[in-house]
Structure formats: structure tokens, C-alpha cells
Amino acid sequence: MKKQFKIMVMFLSFVLLLAACGKSNDMSSNSSKNDKVLKMATSADFKPFESRDKEGNIVGFDIDLANLIADELGYKLEIQDMNFDGLIGALQSKRVDMVMAGMSTTEKRKKNVDFSKEYHRSGEMFLSLPDKKIESLESLEGKTVGVQLGTIQEEGANELSKKYGFTVKPVDNAGVLIQELLSNRVDAVYMDSVVAVGYRDEQGLFGFDDPTTSSPGMAIAFPKGSDLVDDVNKALDKLEKEGKIKELKEKWKLDQVAIE
């Protein structure tokens, strides 16, 4: 009897052990799935593409689109905020998997990173205080124009300054750029049109479009040779076909000044 009891105890222990192992494996599997993280860097000073709300959360068109892409690919999105001029370096050192920051697909950048298909295109605008009467490129002669460091607007302003005789002043952050303008430390700023319109309306500024340049479109940037590019492009195609990208553009009012 005792022998049968011992056998039964051993059998039950074995069953419980198997159940525990199965549960452990299930937990490990779920944990692995939940730990599938997509690390994205941005520069949250580029409203409406990315900025911080009153609670400090990073929000914007790029953020909404990145979340849709992560959902399509089965990832949990993890966002890191940094200065725009440090984004390419973060990709090159593979500290992040991708960058969404209203980044344009310039030939110079293509030498250092890979890009997805373009998801948006807009032009450039000069902003100034209403009483400055800066209404054309010619009226910028002898003035100081602020730009955000590392952007295509910095490159474009440097080229335009050779012809129109103004000084270029780069700063780290688009918000600081506007403060430079409001404090009369620069005479004008040169920005992406969508971003500029937001500041123009909020601050009562004057703006005119740059008629001379045609910017490349915005896209998602990846480290060279990243396996994510094809998958992200497929996700973008799907989201575009379903009309979800259009919905986001309407939500964030991107198409009001977009060049399509």
C-alpha cells in the first residue's frame, strides 16, 4: 500500500513538474513576443510631425505613423528624443533601429543611411516679425537668418545666402529658433512650410514661401543594410492603400501646405 502511495506521489509530482515547465515555456514565449522592441529616434521639436504635449508626451504625425507601422510589424515602439543633428549618428552606431523626424531624403544622407519610400513632401518658408517687412529673398540682404542645425533648411540657406547676401545662424532646436526670432536675435527663420505655418499662426508672424528650392520628400531612415526597410515599405504601402496615412495627414493638417 505504502509502495503504491509512493508511486502515486511520484506520478503526481511528475505531472505537476511538466505543467510547470509548460507554463514556464508559455511565459517565456509571451515575454519574447512582448520584448520585440522597435527603437526609434526623433527630435521632438518639429510640430506637427513630432513635439511634446502639455503632459510631456511625444506626439505628432510621425509618432502616430510610427505606431501604426510598429503594430503592422508586431513590434512595441520605443521612442528616444534627441537633437536633430545627432540622429544620423544614432543610426550609424546602431543605437536605434530607425529615425522618424521629418527627415528629407538628401543625397548626402543617403551616403550614410538607408531610407524607406517617401511618405510626405512639403516646401520651405521664411518667417519674420510683421514689422520687419521681409517679404522676399531680396529683402534678406544684410539680415541674419536662423535655421535648425543639421536640416536641409540649413543647407538651403547656406546656398541662398551666397546669392542674397544674408548671414546664416544655426541653432539646435526649432523651438529655440522661434525664440531667437521673437527676441530679435535673428531677422528671419527658414523652416519646413508645414512647421512654419503652425508657428506663423500661433505667434502672429509673417511668412513667405521660398520660390527657388524644391525639397526632397520625407522618409524613415535606417542604418545601412537594415532588414527593416522592405518590411516598413510594405507596411507603408498597406497603410496608404487603406487610407490611414491620408487620415493622419488630415488629423495633423499636413496637406494644407503640402506639395504633392
Image (cartoon, helix red, strand yellow):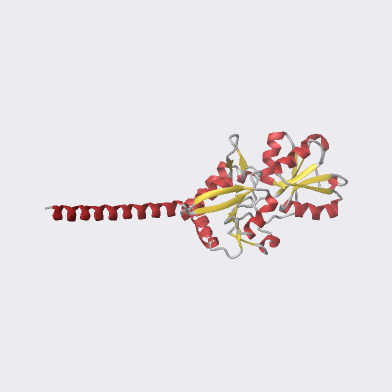
Q: Quadrant of residue 3?
A: bottom left
In percent of width and height, residue 151 lies at: 71, 52
Q: Can the viewer see residue 214?
A: yes
In percent of width and height, residue 118 lies at: 60, 56
Q: Can the viewer see residue 104?
A: no
- Who's the residue at 47% across and 51% down the image? 71
In the rendered image, the residue lying farthest to the front is 2
Left of 85 or right of it: where is 160? right
Viewer-proximal residue among 222 and 209: 222
Viewer-proximal residue among 58 and 12: 12
In the rendered image, the residue lying farthest to the right is 142
In percent of width and height, residue 101 lies at: 63, 50
Q: Quadrant of residue 135?
A: top right
Left of 260 or right of it: where is 27? left
Left of 127 or right of it: where is 218? left
Q: How many marks?
A: 0
- Who's the residue at 68% across and 35% down the image? 202
- Who's the residue at 83% across and 52% down the image? 161
In percent of width and height, residue 16 lies at: 26, 52
Viewer-proximal residue among 154 and 32: 32
* 42 vs 107: above or below: above
